Image (spheres, helix red, strand yellow):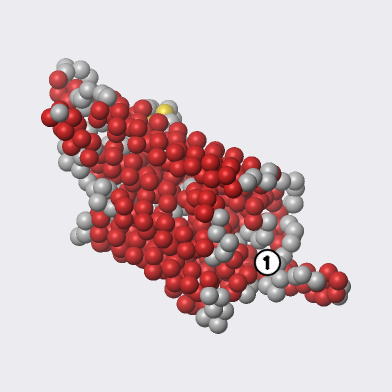
Amino acid sequence: MVHLHERFKAFFKSRWLVFVCAIWIQSFTGIGYVFGSISPMIKSIMGYNQRQLSLLGVVKTLGGSVGFVAGSLSEVLPIWGLLLIGALQNFVGYGLLWYIVHRRLSGVPLWVLCICIFVGGNGETFFNTANLVCCVQNFPKNRGPVVGILKGFCGLTGATLIQVYAIFNFPDKASLIFMVAVGPTMVVIAFMFVVRPVEGHKQVRESDDSSFLFTYSICLVLAAYLLGVLILEDTLNLNQSIITLLALGLIILIVLPIIIPVVLVFFSTPQPSSEEKLLANPLLPRQDTSELILSEAEEERTSELDALPAFERRKRLAHLQAKLLQAAADGAVRVKRDFAYPRPLAMAMLQVIMAFGFFYYAMGWPGQIYVVTVLIGLGYGSHWAILPAAVSELFGLKSFGALYNFLTLSNPAGSLIFSEALASGLYDYYAEKQASLLLKNPISTLGQDKSLTCLGTICYSLTCGILSGLCIVAAMLSLVVVYRTRRVYTQLYGSSNSLI
């Protein structure tokens, strides 16, 4: 009995239990990914045009990117304090947004909704900061896999919340916003005292690699499962019972990582860490431990996905395809490196892939919405996996925090320029052009929504063509960086087998 009591104490002090609870929080708090699902109802109920909707998307991105407040408070507040602040922001911001949309208060100024979305979206920075800081402290030698797995689960939040929402089958569409306000808040409050830095040995264990591989595999299986569920819902007329069973299967997959701390604590014997083995065998040659793990540590989401018009089911399928590719790119996969190629070379290759994806959509070729989301998802996710690592190599870790926060501002800046100004302006132009043609045919105007809607590839073809050209320019600039940094990477990696 005493032995079992000690096991339970070890279980609640396990860093793997903390990591699993952080995964659960991340799985329900990537609120920014839900904007693509709630934006159509905001547009129709509030009577906004695409430019106004894109402005809300920019504010959402800005709120999810301005994390210097959370970063500063992380040095003085405990982890549960950060999570509590984020939960309050999420509840207040999206709670007020739900009240406005539910009551159909169309007279409310746009700036009020902007404040609500900014406050609610900024709560996500507290969730990310708390979980990442805590888990990196608990796994100091496995920072790459930790960050990649947490962000991978976070990227699937949108599809996860939609499937959980489908269980309740609310008649009011605005109920999804209510669930966004209440659901993540409840999850965070439930686990905010579990997610904390733990004491004890934090060296690399032999079981760590298999445990991280198992967790990462669950992330990919979860993404594939969500994609399959959405395809079934799109092609078949499923009844509520089947939808509920599919959602329960989703919850089981999310809970499945708890197997790791249970097995490690209750069904395995303690194993010495790799450092302890080196101490026990001082004559063994020490292996090269200079490694840099390719991992994603940024709030990654494309504003173009938020601006896609109509065809909600197709958009959700394509959006999830992109997130599946991003999760694969962001998963902190260790790849042996035999040559000292500068890391920006991979960025240039990925930017060419993104350029082809945008060009494919601009040409209006078959299946363009799926092709562009897959290619852009792969390129975009890989981009934010490579960029932070490259910055740490070129500038070191001393000022990495400041440089990293500066990099995150590129998301709202790009969203403001390319989404709000470029894409939305062209979208409204073609929508007005199509509306003027419909006015000439009164029969065609029957049943039309008051808000302007653009139909067809033409809505974003010019935008994607411009973005394709800009990706080519970015690839050329990356090659310039490759040329300027080739000596640095030769000194860093030379002929040694390092990890990227």
Locate residue 82: give its quadrant. Answer: bottom left
Provide residue 148's location: percent of width, then percent of height.
40, 42
The amino acid beneath tag 1 is Tyr
Residue at the front extreme of this rendering: 241
Provide residue 344's location: percent of width, then percent of height.
47, 44
Label 1 residue SS: helix
Q: Which of 242 and 408 is in front in this view?
A: 242
Residue at the bottom extreme of this rendering: 107
Q: Which of 429 and 196 is in front in this view?
A: 196
Q: Nearer the viewer, residue 320 or 5?
A: 5
Whether 350 is drawn above or below 179: the answer is above
Q: Seen in the image, is 320 located left or right of residue 179?
A: right
**Residue sitting at x 45%, y 57%:** 31
Locate residue 90: give its quadrant. Answer: bottom left
Instruction: Please rate how many residues cluster around mark 1, counting C-alpha atoms within 10 Å: few if below 14, some from 14 to 19, many from 20.
Output: many
Q: Mark 1 points at which residue?
A: 427
Whether 81 is drawn above or below 495: the answer is below
Locate residue 201: give its quadrant. Answer: top left
Q: Seen in the image, is 397 located left or right of residue 225?
A: left
Provide residue 394's location: percent of width, then percent of height.
36, 47
Whether residue 439 is visible, yes or no, is yes
**Residue sitting at x 38%, y 46%:** 24
**Which quadrant is the C terminus positioned in?**
top left
**Which quadrant is the N terminus positioned in?**
top left
Provide residue 150's location: percent of width, then percent of height.
39, 45
**Residue sitting at x 41%, y 61%:** 182
**Residue sitting at x 30%, y 50%:** 191
